[in-house]
Image (cartoon, rainbow, N blue to C red):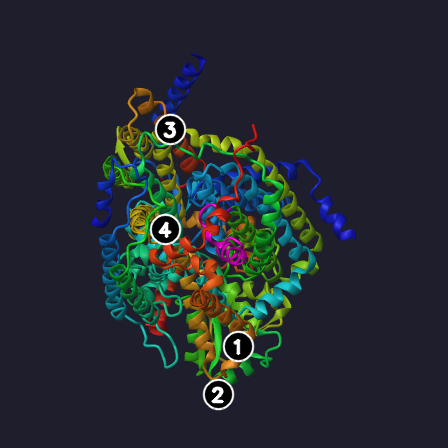
């Protein structure tokens, strides 16, 4: 009891309040600028916070961490550019919603579920950080990680809404892009063609590719298709507040995605980006209306944002309880804590329990502040999009370039981003989706690395000694995710609704739309927004 | 009307600001060094061990030199990009950098144009001595047990990445003690130690700080240094335990382009020597679980060359 | 890349989406096949520092396996593109003829800007002058002109503060060397 009082008492000062506000402002700002990630902001701020005491310092860093997780949803929804990788999945349904004039609703709901996701995941941290993190470490080893990532790759099928085959081709392109650079197991160079910028373990810059494929591609596509008569729907925000029905609809995706997020957060190699995509796909599979995912379904936004936000508590748990960075922001946090003489790891919980309580309290306060700030400021942010195109386009382009430059301080990264943008437009025009490319690039290196490691460990051991039931279960799930939709499609009849999501070509599709006109109706009835516009 | 006047005023101010922005006087060759701000190139991302060591030193260097020392992160290719960049600068001493142990390895491991003769080494500033650890429920109680097991059959040893100093250390043990340690590359030092803690790998080689942070879940068996560590008084060195003098460490120092004028090098050398002595720098390294080992320019240069040859033999 | 050109033919029609395009589908599949074969060839030529021992994977394994998968998928896609009617493209808007000009000139201006930015700074009149703020201002103004604004205010009043803001935020606040 005493510990809890002490933990909270440490936060009762003006300095702490100022630090919270500073972190809040910085976090929301960097989140909203594509390219500048929370990692970068925390790293830069750590130069300043090391002059502070631990508690105010942690206030700045943790609040940036939380607030950036709110801010990055805004460009995802409004300009199809993820503010940070964590909001990649938000673009899938968020941007289509904005194009339909429902940006206000998407933004509000996104802020709510982000807050709820973080708070829920903090329960893990508060309840039993050390035991849970130890279980996660002991049961998620290389074979399990490989299996988990293979399972994650099946999300490709879901993102490729129109043609599974094109989606898989896109996925292979992404996986191949991920193999560029240093092969982590042996240090061999692959596909670098003597370019030293490609020779690192990251190879092709992930941030540059997502900003290029999502943001700049959308920008170029708008430039290609823009003409005077067309109305510009985004600034028509629609209503802001979700209806009761929408809240109820969101419950199921929220429940599923928060589970995905918490688990992914506890796994060191998986962060908000992967969790968001898996959460989105899980929610799609259980939805009554899977076909409308990726076309502006509110449930999609709920699922993506819940899952990626629910990783925060898990990441914090892994970091503080084991000293293993749960994500890249936490890697920087560990550095700062070392400067203060605090060693994250199991002994932190026994030697400084008050500090652990303080950190949990900071996280909760940061969530509340960020939610309030997001709701207040959303309207202003959206109004920026009323700027005429001839001002908006150059500004977005310049800031996308600056944001990617800031990740490595190298022009090469900017060129990568622009090339990704041009390729992205071509892919978009020929109907190859960008989502699987990004998914492959994100997961490919993790899959390969863990497979290589597993095979090294396999030497001289029995098969089942290395491949645990957890790993085999994930592999089985991955196989099921592939096979079940195919079988259902074969069966036809009642299952045609599911077959529809897998329709590989127009022929199949035409048949289905003819035979199930009901589908069309259920698609359009999700949105009775004509008279509910809030003033 | 008012809005228009306001926007014009803003634009005017911006134009004036723009005209002044980014203009700085060019260094005068005749005046004493340093006249302008220095750039400190860091070969890794912000927030990592190299970055924090460099930033802690940069703050002290500013006091010594009386100009700003601006840390600049240039990650990529395991640091090769930053090192090749530093090698290509004008030899005026205004671009210095943090050189981790990889400066002696990258030519061998990645064929990068990173050779000792491309640089002027100013001084070593830190050392993270290597330790070998096993999981808490591992059958190996002592270093002798582990080495004996390695001599009989294959033992998996986790490290922070392919081409890292800790992979080289595992190979170095094989070389000296005739063991069959199989290095397994992980993503970072903490992850590697965690792999030993969970029993996934038989052992892990890492910096001392990373192993200590795991607390009771690992048992640290040996230190690859010439004496025991203050933070691990009960853990023997390799010399004590198995009679082989095996020393590996993640060292780091400050370097700049080759052929800088001697007087410039001397000024930088003194500044680094004094900065290393400062309390704040010493505290930082202690908190991070590292040792502050200083070598002056001449010693550091011969040390790097020595290490370069060693790694060429081990990893080539 | 010429596949997208055929879109332009629709300008002036009522349809907001481009029509299904069988030629483009086939061209896409062929291009993807060519790329995958190329990658397969390159994969087998990756230089290895050491061969993998039995049961292990080396640096070639992953890209080789992936490019073979890519070839299989591309062939399947080619079959579908030839054998079945082309899919609808209702999710896309029609490309306008002015659009090509817009994107091409944007890329050109951007390339020039990136080159100037990469120079960094020049020494003149005894001062080292950072080029970025000036280049960014001119770049923004040029793009604004390309996108159709026609007033001195659009060319000056918007780009100047915006370039200044970018410079202040990145170079001064974040200390990123532009």
* Viewer-nearest residue: B81 or C53: C53
- The answer to which of marks 3 and 4 sits earlier in the sequence is 4
In what element is the residue under mark 2?
Answer: helix
Which circle, 2 or 1, is nearer the viewer? 1
* Viewer-nearest residue: B270 or A348: A348
Measure the alpha-carbon separation of dots 2 and 4: 48 Å
Residue picked out by circle 1: B202
Residues rendered magenta in the picture: A276-297
* Viewer-nearest residue: B70 or C90: C90
Residue picked out by circle 3: A388
Q: Are marks 2 and 3 on the same chain?
A: no
Label of residue A209 in the image: 4
Position of residue A367 in the picture relative to residue A168 (left or right):
right
> Where is residue A83 shown, x and y percent of the image?
46, 44
Residue A380 visible from this viewpoint: yes
Q: Chain of mark 3?
A: A
> Where is residue C168 shown, x and y percent of the image?
42, 33
- Name the quarter where the C terminus of chain A is drawn: top right
Q: Is A3 colored magenta in this rendering? A: no
Residue sitting at 41 percent across and 14 percent down? B5
Instruction: Please identify the quarter of the rendering in which residue A334 is found.
Output: bottom right
Q: Chain of mark 1?
A: B
């Amino acid at each position: 009891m005493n510990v809890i009082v002490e933990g909270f008492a440490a936060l009762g000062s003006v300095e702490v309040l100022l630090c919270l506000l500073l972190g809040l402002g910085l976090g929301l700002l960097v989140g909203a600028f594509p390219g500048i990630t929370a990692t970068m902001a925390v790293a830069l701020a750590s130069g300043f916070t090391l002059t502070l005491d631990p508690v105010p310092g942690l206030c700045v860093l943790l609040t940036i961490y939380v607030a950036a997780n709110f801010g990055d949803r805004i460009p995802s929804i409004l300009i199809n550019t993820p503010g940070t990788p964590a909001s990649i999945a938000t673009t899938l349904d968020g941007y289509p919603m904005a194009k339909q004039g429902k940006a206000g609703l998407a933004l509000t709901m996104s802020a709510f579920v982000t807050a709820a996701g973080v708070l829920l995941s903090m329960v893990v941290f508060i309840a039993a950080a050390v035991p849970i993190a130890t279980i996660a470490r002991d049961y998620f080893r290389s074979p399990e990680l490989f299996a988990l990532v293979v399972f994650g790759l099946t999300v490709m099928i879901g993102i490729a809404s129109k043609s599974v085959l094109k989606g898989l081709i896109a996925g292979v392109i992404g996986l191949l892009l991920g193999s560029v650079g240093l092969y982590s197991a042996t240090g061999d160079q692959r596909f670098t063609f003597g370019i030293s910028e490609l020779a690192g373990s990251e190879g092709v810059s992930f941030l540059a590719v997502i900003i290029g494929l999502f943001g700049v591609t959308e920008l170029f596509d708008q430039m290609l298709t823009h003409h005077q008569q067309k109305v510009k729907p985004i600034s028509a925000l629609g209503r802001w507040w979700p209806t009761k029905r929408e809240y109820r609809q969101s419950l199921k995706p929220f429940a599923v995605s928060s589970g995905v997020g918490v688990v992914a957060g506890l796994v060191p190699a998986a962060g908000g980006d992967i969790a968001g995509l898996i959460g989105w796909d899980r929610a799609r599979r259980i939805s009554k209306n899977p076909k409308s995912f990726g076309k502006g379904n509110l449930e999609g936004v709920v699922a993506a944002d819940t899952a990626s936000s629910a990783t925060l508590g898990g990441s914090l748990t892994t970091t503080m309880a084991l000293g293993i960075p749960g994500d890249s922001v936490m890697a920087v946090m560990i550095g700062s804590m070392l400067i203060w003489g605090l060693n994250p790891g199991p002994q932190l919980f026994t030697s400084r329990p008050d500090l652990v309580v303080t950190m949990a309290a900071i996280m909760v306060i940061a969530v509340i502040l960020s939610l309030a700030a997001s709701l207040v400021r959303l309207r202003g942010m959206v109004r920026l999009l009323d700027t005429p195109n001839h001002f908006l386009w150059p500004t977005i382009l310049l800031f996308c370039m600056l944001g990617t430059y800031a990740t490595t301080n190298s022009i090469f990264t900017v060129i990568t981003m622009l090339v990704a943008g041009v390729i992205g437009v071509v892919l978009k025009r020929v109907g190859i989706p960008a989502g699987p490319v990004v998914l492959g690039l994100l997961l490919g290196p993790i899959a390969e690395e863990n497979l290589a490691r597993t095979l090294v460990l396999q030497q001289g051991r029995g098969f089942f000694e290395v491949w645990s039931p957890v790993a085999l279960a994930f592999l089985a799930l991955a196989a099921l995710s592939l096979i079940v939709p195919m079988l259902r499609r074969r069966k036809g009849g009642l299952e045609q609704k599911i077959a529809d999501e897998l329709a590989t070509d127009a022929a199949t599709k035409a048949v289905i739309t003819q035979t199930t006109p009901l589908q069309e109706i259920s698609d359009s009835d999700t949105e009775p927004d004509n008279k509910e516009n809030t003033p | 009307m008012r809005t228009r006047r306001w926007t014009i005023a803003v634009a005017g101010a911006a134009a004036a600001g723009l005209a002044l922005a980014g203009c700085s006087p060019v260094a005068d060759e005749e005046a004493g060094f340093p006249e302008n701000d220095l750039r400190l190139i860091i070969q890794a991302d912000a927030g990592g061990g190299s970055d924090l060591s460099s930033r802690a030193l940069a703050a002290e260097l500013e006091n010594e030199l009386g100009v700003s020392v601006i840390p600049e992160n240039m990650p990529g290719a395991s640091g090769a990009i930053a090192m090749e960049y530093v090698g290509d600068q004008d030899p005026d001493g205004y671009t210095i950098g943090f050189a981790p142990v990889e400066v002696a390895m990258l030519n061998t491991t990645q064929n990068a144009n990173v050779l000792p003769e491309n640089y002027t080494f100013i001084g070593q500033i830190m050392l993270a001595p290597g330790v070998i650890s096993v999981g808490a429920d591992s059958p190996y109680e002592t270093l002798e047990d582990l080495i004996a097991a390695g001599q009989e059959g294959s033992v998996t040893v986790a490290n922070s990445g392919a081409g890292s100093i800790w992979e080289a250390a595992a190979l170095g043990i094989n070389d000296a003690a005739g063991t069959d340690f199989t290095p397994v590359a992980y993503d970072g030092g903490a992850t590697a130690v965690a792999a030993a803690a969970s029993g996934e790998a038989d052992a892990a080689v890492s910096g001392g700080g990373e192993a200590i942070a795991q607390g009771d879940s690992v048992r640290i068996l040996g230190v690859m240094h010439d004496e025991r560590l203050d933070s691990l008084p009960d853990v023997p060195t390799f010399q004590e335990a198995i009679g082989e003098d095996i020393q590996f460490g993640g060292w780091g120092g400050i370097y700049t382009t080759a052929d800088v004028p001697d007087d410039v090098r001397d000024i930088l050398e003194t500044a680094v020597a004094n900065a290393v002595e400062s309390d704040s720098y010493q505290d930082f390294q202690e908190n991070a679980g590292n040792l502050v080992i200083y070598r002056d320019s001449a010693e550091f240069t011969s040390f790097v060359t020595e290490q370069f040859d060693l790694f060429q033999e081990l990893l080539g | 890349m010429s596949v997208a050109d055929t879109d332009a033919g629709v300008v002036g029609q009522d349809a907001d989406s481009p029509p299904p395009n069988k030629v483009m589908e086939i061209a896409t599949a062929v291009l993807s096949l060519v790329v995958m074969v190329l990658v397969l060839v390159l994969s087998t030529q990756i230089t290895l520092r050491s061969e993998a021992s039995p049961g292990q994977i080396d640096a070639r394994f992953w890209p080789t396996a992936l490019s073979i998968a890519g070839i299989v998928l591309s062939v399947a896609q080619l079959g579908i593109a030839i054998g079945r009617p082309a899919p609808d493209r209702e999710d896309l808007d029609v490309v306008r003829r002015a659009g090509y000009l817009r994107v091409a000139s944007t890329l050109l201006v951007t390339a020039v800007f990136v080159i100037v930015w990469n120079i960094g700074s020049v020494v003149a009149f005894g001062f080292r002058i950072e080029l970025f703020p000036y280049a960014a201002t001119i770049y923004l103004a040029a793009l604004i002109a390309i996108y159709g604004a026609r007033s001195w205010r659009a060319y000056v009043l918007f780009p100047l503060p915006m370039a200044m803001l970018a410079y202040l935020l990145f170079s001064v606040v974040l200390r990123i060397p532009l």
